[in-house]
Amino acid sequence: MIRAALTLARADPPSAALMAALLLVLLAPPLVAYEPAWEAAASLGYTACFALIVTLRLAPAARHATRSYRFAVHRAAGLACIASVAAHVGVMVAGDPFVLDYLGWLMPLHVLAGLLGAVALLLATATREPALRLALRLGGRPRVHAWSGYVAGALVAGHAIASSSKFTASWQPLLVAGVFVALLIPVSGGGGFTSSAPARVMGADINALLALLGALAILLMAAPALVAGLAG
Protein backbone atom coordinates (compact mmCIF):
# COMPACT_ATOMS: atom_id res chain seq x y z
CA MET A 1 0.00 0.00 0.00
CA ILE A 2 2.79 2.40 0.94
CA ARG A 3 4.68 1.75 -2.30
CA ALA A 4 1.52 2.28 -4.37
CA ALA A 5 0.74 5.50 -2.48
CA LEU A 6 4.25 6.80 -3.14
CA THR A 7 3.85 5.97 -6.83
CA LEU A 8 0.67 8.06 -7.01
CA ALA A 9 2.21 10.85 -4.94
CA ARG A 10 5.13 11.13 -7.35
CA ALA A 11 2.90 10.93 -10.41
CA ASP A 12 0.27 13.47 -9.33
CA PRO A 13 0.69 15.06 -5.87
CA PRO A 14 -2.76 16.75 -5.83
CA SER A 15 -4.48 13.38 -6.30
CA ALA A 16 -2.53 11.91 -3.40
CA ALA A 17 -3.31 14.94 -1.22
CA LEU A 18 -7.05 14.76 -1.91
CA MET A 19 -7.13 11.02 -1.22
CA ALA A 20 -5.18 11.53 2.01
CA ALA A 21 -7.65 14.21 3.12
CA LEU A 22 -10.61 11.90 2.47
CA LEU A 23 -8.90 9.03 4.31
CA LEU A 24 -8.23 11.36 7.26
CA VAL A 25 -11.95 12.15 7.47
CA LEU A 26 -12.98 8.50 7.33
CA LEU A 27 -10.47 7.32 9.95
CA ALA A 28 -10.93 10.22 12.35
CA PRO A 29 -12.06 9.01 15.79
CA PRO A 30 -14.42 7.90 17.09
CA LEU A 31 -14.54 4.83 14.84
CA VAL A 32 -17.81 3.01 15.43
CA ALA A 33 -18.19 -0.53 14.07
CA TYR A 34 -21.52 -1.46 12.50
CA GLU A 35 -22.75 -4.74 11.05
CA PRO A 36 -20.13 -6.35 8.77
CA ALA A 37 -22.30 -6.06 5.64
CA TRP A 38 -22.84 -2.35 6.18
CA GLU A 39 -19.15 -1.78 6.91
CA ALA A 40 -18.21 -3.63 3.73
CA ALA A 41 -20.77 -1.74 1.63
CA ALA A 42 -19.71 1.62 3.06
CA SER A 43 -16.01 0.85 2.51
CA LEU A 44 -16.66 -0.09 -1.12
CA GLY A 45 -18.58 3.15 -1.58
CA TYR A 46 -15.69 5.18 -0.17
CA THR A 47 -13.30 3.22 -2.39
CA ALA A 48 -15.38 4.38 -5.36
CA CYS A 49 -14.80 7.94 -4.12
CA PHE A 50 -11.03 7.38 -4.05
CA ALA A 51 -11.15 5.95 -7.57
CA LEU A 52 -13.25 8.89 -8.74
CA ILE A 53 -10.63 11.30 -7.40
CA VAL A 54 -7.99 9.68 -9.58
CA THR A 55 -10.35 9.44 -12.56
CA LEU A 56 -11.24 13.13 -12.57
CA ARG A 57 -7.77 14.38 -11.65
CA LEU A 58 -6.11 12.41 -14.44
CA ALA A 59 -8.54 13.02 -17.28
CA PRO A 60 -6.38 13.20 -20.42
CA ALA A 61 -6.20 16.14 -22.79
CA ALA A 62 -8.36 15.74 -25.90
CA ARG A 63 -5.36 15.48 -28.21
CA HIS A 64 -4.11 12.44 -26.30
CA ALA A 65 -7.57 11.07 -25.56
CA THR A 66 -6.92 7.45 -26.47
CA ARG A 67 -3.15 7.01 -26.67
CA SER A 68 -1.55 8.51 -23.58
CA TYR A 69 -0.25 6.96 -20.42
CA ARG A 70 -2.51 9.37 -18.58
CA PHE A 71 -5.52 7.95 -20.44
CA ALA A 72 -4.62 4.38 -19.46
CA VAL A 73 -4.50 5.28 -15.77
CA HIS A 74 -7.66 7.40 -16.09
CA ARG A 75 -9.52 4.51 -17.70
CA ALA A 76 -8.32 1.96 -15.14
CA ALA A 77 -9.42 4.23 -12.29
CA GLY A 78 -12.80 4.81 -13.95
CA LEU A 79 -13.42 1.09 -14.31
CA ALA A 80 -12.38 0.58 -10.68
CA CYS A 81 -14.88 3.27 -9.69
CA ILE A 82 -17.72 1.58 -11.60
CA ALA A 83 -16.79 -1.82 -10.13
CA SER A 84 -16.69 -0.37 -6.60
CA VAL A 85 -20.11 1.26 -7.03
CA ALA A 86 -21.59 -2.02 -8.31
CA ALA A 87 -20.06 -3.91 -5.38
CA HIS A 88 -21.26 -1.21 -2.96
CA VAL A 89 -24.85 -1.64 -4.12
CA GLY A 90 -24.61 -5.43 -4.39
CA VAL A 91 -23.26 -5.94 -0.87
CA MET A 92 -25.81 -3.53 0.57
CA VAL A 93 -28.76 -5.29 -1.06
CA ALA A 94 -27.39 -8.75 -0.18
CA GLY A 95 -26.86 -7.70 3.44
CA ASP A 96 -30.28 -6.08 3.81
CA PRO A 97 -32.81 -6.59 0.98
CA PHE A 98 -35.13 -4.11 2.68
CA VAL A 99 -32.99 -1.26 1.35
CA LEU A 100 -34.91 -1.77 -1.90
CA ASP A 101 -37.95 -0.37 -0.09
CA TYR A 102 -36.27 3.04 -0.31
CA LEU A 103 -36.73 3.04 -4.07
CA GLY A 104 -39.74 4.98 -5.23
CA TRP A 105 -41.13 8.49 -5.45
CA LEU A 106 -40.56 9.13 -1.75
CA MET A 107 -36.95 7.93 -1.62
CA PRO A 108 -34.60 9.98 0.59
CA LEU A 109 -32.58 12.64 -1.20
CA HIS A 110 -29.24 10.98 -0.42
CA VAL A 111 -30.48 7.75 -2.04
CA LEU A 112 -31.66 9.70 -5.09
CA ALA A 113 -28.27 11.42 -5.31
CA GLY A 114 -26.53 8.06 -5.17
CA LEU A 115 -28.72 6.58 -7.91
CA LEU A 116 -28.30 9.59 -10.18
CA GLY A 117 -24.57 9.58 -9.51
CA ALA A 118 -24.38 5.94 -10.61
CA VAL A 119 -26.33 6.79 -13.77
CA ALA A 120 -23.96 9.68 -14.49
CA LEU A 121 -20.98 7.35 -14.04
CA LEU A 122 -22.50 4.85 -16.46
CA LEU A 123 -23.15 7.65 -18.96
CA ALA A 124 -19.56 8.86 -18.63
CA THR A 125 -18.31 5.33 -19.23
CA ALA A 126 -20.64 4.63 -22.14
CA THR A 127 -19.93 7.89 -23.96
CA ARG A 128 -16.23 7.11 -23.86
CA GLU A 129 -16.63 4.09 -26.13
CA PRO A 130 -16.13 4.96 -29.83
CA ALA A 131 -18.87 2.65 -31.19
CA LEU A 132 -21.50 4.03 -28.83
CA ARG A 133 -20.40 7.60 -29.40
CA LEU A 134 -20.89 7.05 -33.11
CA ALA A 135 -24.32 5.49 -32.57
CA LEU A 136 -25.39 8.41 -30.36
CA ARG A 137 -23.86 10.93 -32.80
CA LEU A 138 -21.59 12.35 -30.12
CA GLY A 139 -18.54 12.57 -32.35
CA GLY A 140 -18.54 16.38 -32.36
CA ARG A 141 -19.41 16.72 -28.67
CA PRO A 142 -16.62 15.11 -26.64
CA ARG A 143 -17.58 17.14 -23.57
CA VAL A 144 -20.54 14.84 -22.84
CA HIS A 145 -18.12 12.35 -21.33
CA ALA A 146 -16.32 14.98 -19.27
CA TRP A 147 -19.42 16.71 -17.96
CA SER A 148 -21.03 13.38 -17.05
CA GLY A 149 -17.98 12.71 -14.90
CA TYR A 150 -18.19 16.11 -13.21
CA VAL A 151 -21.92 15.67 -12.53
CA ALA A 152 -21.18 12.24 -11.10
CA GLY A 153 -18.56 13.81 -8.83
CA ALA A 154 -21.04 16.36 -7.47
CA LEU A 155 -23.76 13.74 -6.91
CA VAL A 156 -21.39 11.25 -5.30
CA ALA A 157 -20.16 13.98 -2.95
CA GLY A 158 -23.73 14.80 -1.93
CA HIS A 159 -24.55 11.13 -1.44
CA ALA A 160 -21.45 10.46 0.67
CA ILE A 161 -21.89 13.54 2.86
CA ALA A 162 -25.62 13.03 3.45
CA SER A 163 -25.56 9.28 4.07
CA SER A 164 -22.32 8.74 5.96
CA SER A 165 -22.50 7.80 9.62
CA LYS A 166 -18.73 8.31 9.91
CA PHE A 167 -19.02 12.08 10.21
CA THR A 168 -19.35 12.97 13.88
CA ALA A 169 -17.77 16.43 13.70
CA SER A 170 -18.81 19.43 11.62
CA TRP A 171 -15.36 19.73 9.98
CA GLN A 172 -15.62 16.30 8.38
CA PRO A 173 -18.41 16.92 5.83
CA LEU A 174 -16.89 20.34 5.11
CA LEU A 175 -13.54 18.76 4.27
CA VAL A 176 -15.19 16.11 2.09
CA ALA A 177 -17.11 18.84 0.27
CA GLY A 178 -13.84 20.70 -0.24
CA VAL A 179 -12.21 17.60 -1.72
CA PHE A 180 -14.98 17.18 -4.28
CA VAL A 181 -15.15 20.88 -5.09
CA ALA A 182 -11.44 20.69 -5.89
CA LEU A 183 -12.21 17.85 -8.30
CA LEU A 184 -14.70 20.00 -10.20
CA ILE A 185 -11.99 22.55 -10.98
CA PRO A 186 -10.59 21.78 -14.47
CA VAL A 187 -7.13 20.25 -14.30
CA SER A 188 -4.46 21.67 -16.59
CA GLY A 189 -1.23 20.04 -17.57
CA GLY A 190 -0.24 16.41 -17.40
CA GLY A 191 0.59 16.07 -13.74
CA GLY A 192 3.41 13.59 -13.37
CA PHE A 193 2.17 11.44 -16.24
CA THR A 194 3.86 11.74 -19.59
CA SER A 195 2.11 11.32 -22.92
CA SER A 196 3.79 7.96 -23.46
CA ALA A 197 5.48 5.26 -21.42
CA PRO A 198 6.71 1.69 -21.89
CA ALA A 199 3.97 -0.88 -21.52
CA ARG A 200 5.82 -2.47 -18.61
CA VAL A 201 5.94 0.81 -16.67
CA MET A 202 2.32 1.63 -17.52
CA GLY A 203 1.11 -1.79 -16.41
CA ALA A 204 3.10 -1.62 -13.16
CA ASP A 205 1.66 1.79 -12.26
CA ILE A 206 -1.90 0.72 -13.04
CA ASN A 207 -1.44 -2.40 -10.90
CA ALA A 208 -0.04 -0.20 -8.13
CA LEU A 209 -3.09 2.05 -8.32
CA LEU A 210 -5.50 -0.89 -8.18
CA ALA A 211 -3.54 -2.37 -5.28
CA LEU A 212 -3.80 0.95 -3.44
CA LEU A 213 -7.57 1.10 -3.94
CA GLY A 214 -7.93 -2.48 -2.72
CA ALA A 215 -5.78 -1.77 0.34
CA LEU A 216 -7.85 1.31 1.16
CA ALA A 217 -11.05 -0.74 0.99
CA ILE A 218 -9.60 -3.36 3.36
CA LEU A 219 -8.29 -0.69 5.73
CA LEU A 220 -11.67 1.04 5.91
CA MET A 221 -13.41 -2.29 6.57
CA ALA A 222 -10.94 -3.46 9.22
CA ALA A 223 -10.22 -0.28 11.17
CA PRO A 224 -13.59 0.09 12.99
CA ALA A 225 -13.68 -3.62 13.93
CA LEU A 226 -10.07 -3.47 15.12
CA VAL A 227 -10.75 -0.43 17.29
CA ALA A 228 -13.89 -2.04 18.70
CA GLY A 229 -11.97 -5.22 19.47
CA LEU A 230 -9.19 -3.35 21.26
CA ALA A 231 -11.73 -1.31 23.24
CA GLY A 232 -13.57 -4.48 24.28
Image (cartoon, rainbow, N blue to C red):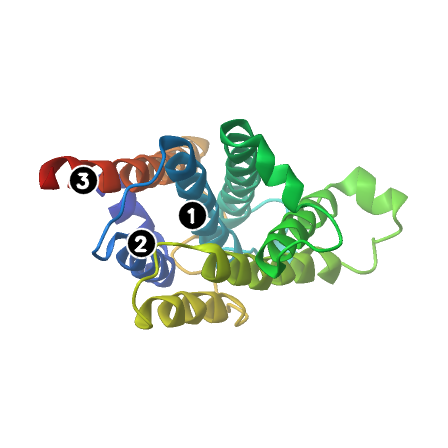
On-image quarter of the C terminus: top left
C-alpha span from label 3 to label 2 = 16 Å
Who's the residue at 61% across and 62% down the image? 150
Quarter of the figure with residue 85 = top right
- Residue 96 in percent (x, y) is at 52, 32
N-term mark: 3 or 1: 1
Q: Secondary structure at mark 2?
A: helix
Residue 109, compared with residue 221, is above or below; it is below
Residue 63, compared with residue 79, is above or below; it is below
Judge whether residue 136 can be spotted in this image.
yes
The dot on residue 151 is: none
Judge whether residue 1 can be spotted in this image.
no
State left or right for residue 200 relative to residue 118.
left
Residue 198, compared with residue 145, is above or below; it is above
- Residue 92 in percent (x, y) is at 51, 35
State left or right for residue 25 relative to residue 158.
left
Quarter of the figure with residue 23 = bottom left
Q: What residue is shown with label 3?
A: 228
Q: What residue is shown with label 2?
A: 26
Who's the residue at 42% across and 71% down the image? 178
The crowding category of the residue bearing disc 3, from other C-alpha atoms within 10 Å (few below 14, some 14 to 19, many at least 20), is few
The foreground one among 226 and 119 is 226
Who's the residue at 48% across and 56% down the image? 163
The foreground one among 54 and 204 is 54
Q: What residue is shown with label 1?
A: 46
N-term mark: 3 or 2: 2
- Amino acid carrying label 3: it is Ala
